[in-house]
Image (tube, rainbow, N blue to C red):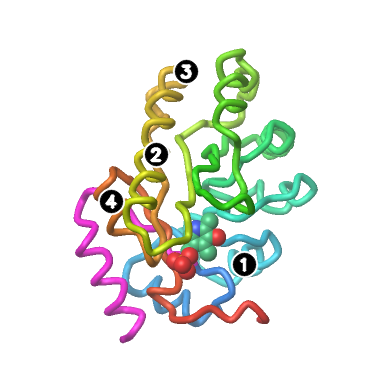
Amino acid sequence: MSIKSQIEEIVASLGDRASLVVVSKTYPVEDLEQAYATGQRRFGESRPQEMTMKHGALPQDIEWHMIGHLQRNKVRMIAPYVSMIESVDSLRLAEAIEVEAARCDRTIDCLLEIHVAQEQSKTGWRYEELLELVKSGGFDHMRHIRWRGVMGIASNTYDEEVVRGDFNLLKEHKEELAQYFTDDFDTLSMGMSHDYILAVECGSTSVRVGSKIFGERDYSK
Ligand SMILES: *Cc1c(COP(=O)(O)O)cnc(C)c1O
């Protein structure tokens, strides 16, 4: 199946329930151009260097989403143009984003990445810790960050009930946190190639899909 037909199929299945972030990490610029030609404008990358290279090579109306673990010393590279940082998983990272966004005279949309999967290895906040911090006003001084919601990754299992449980939990977290933020806190980013349909059933507003569109990823590139 072509990139175009895969995207059309996914977009049709989302309807107006959720929007699509085309996860383009590791794929070549030519593949992104094909996705762009179908009308897609939101692309997700996980490495600042790669994202910056692609940002330079592709049309300027693309909205770039950082979805991978971000080191504080790499924030400066993407701050001038990044549209959303979905993977904010520590206070120190948020503080670095605040500093760099202020330096660029921008407000950057950000999501709080929360750990909901069963596996230990997955990144993201421990929810209890995050809630404490939010309640105590730990993010209130960050004038150059617009908090838009939460992002999470479900357990990597074929057991649909486990995955559904993770998605429901993330949605609950988002709803509880929302009372401490403005009405802009409206995004529930969950669902990838293998589980996005379930994620949308569970209330996802933004899915992040890569390999279903572009084919198997080759991490050696
Ligand atoms: C790579 C990645 C995706 C997309 O994964 P696919 O299985 O290729 O759809 C989604 N979210 C995050 C955080 C990722 O790192």
Indicate the amino acid at tag 4: Val
The numbered mark, 1 or 2, whose residue comes first in the sequence reads: 1
* Range shown magenta: 1-23
Task: Tell me the distance, in whole angstroms, between the alpha carbons under discs 1 and 2.
Answer: 27 Å
* Image x and y of residue 57, in percent: 59, 72
User: Which comes sooner in the sequence, label 2 or label 3?
Assistant: 3
Q: Secondary structure at mark 1?
A: helix
Whether tag 2 and tag 3 are in contact, CB under 8 A, the answer is: no
Residue at x 47% of width, y 74% of height: 32
Where is residue 44? Give x, y as percent: 51, 60
**Number of the label disc, if any, that sits on residue 204:** none
Disc 2 is placed on an element classified as strand
* Residue 58 vertical position relative to residue 88 in the rendered view, above or below: below
Single out the mark in the foreground, 3 or 1. 3
- Say which residue appears at 33% left-offset and 85% top-offset: 2
- Could you give the CA–CA distance between mark 1 and mark 4, rounded to whole angstroms? 32 Å
Q: For residue 200, which numbered disc appears in the image?
A: 4
Q: Nearest the camera: 81 or 151?
A: 151
What residue is pinned by disc 2?
187
Residue 130, by quadrant, is top right
Residue 88 in which image quadrant: top right
- Picture coordinates of residue 147 (x, y %)? 51, 31
Residue 32 shown left or right of residue 122 in the figure: left
Residue at point 38%, 75% (across, down): 213
Residues tagged 3 and 1 counted as in contact (Cβ below 8 A): no
Could you tell which of marks 1 and 4 lies nearer the N-terminus?
1
Per the model, the C-alpha gap separating discs 2 and 4 is 12 Å
CB contact under 8 Å: marks 1 and 4: no
Q: Which mark is residue 180?
A: 3
**Residue placed under numbered mark 1 in the picture:** 56
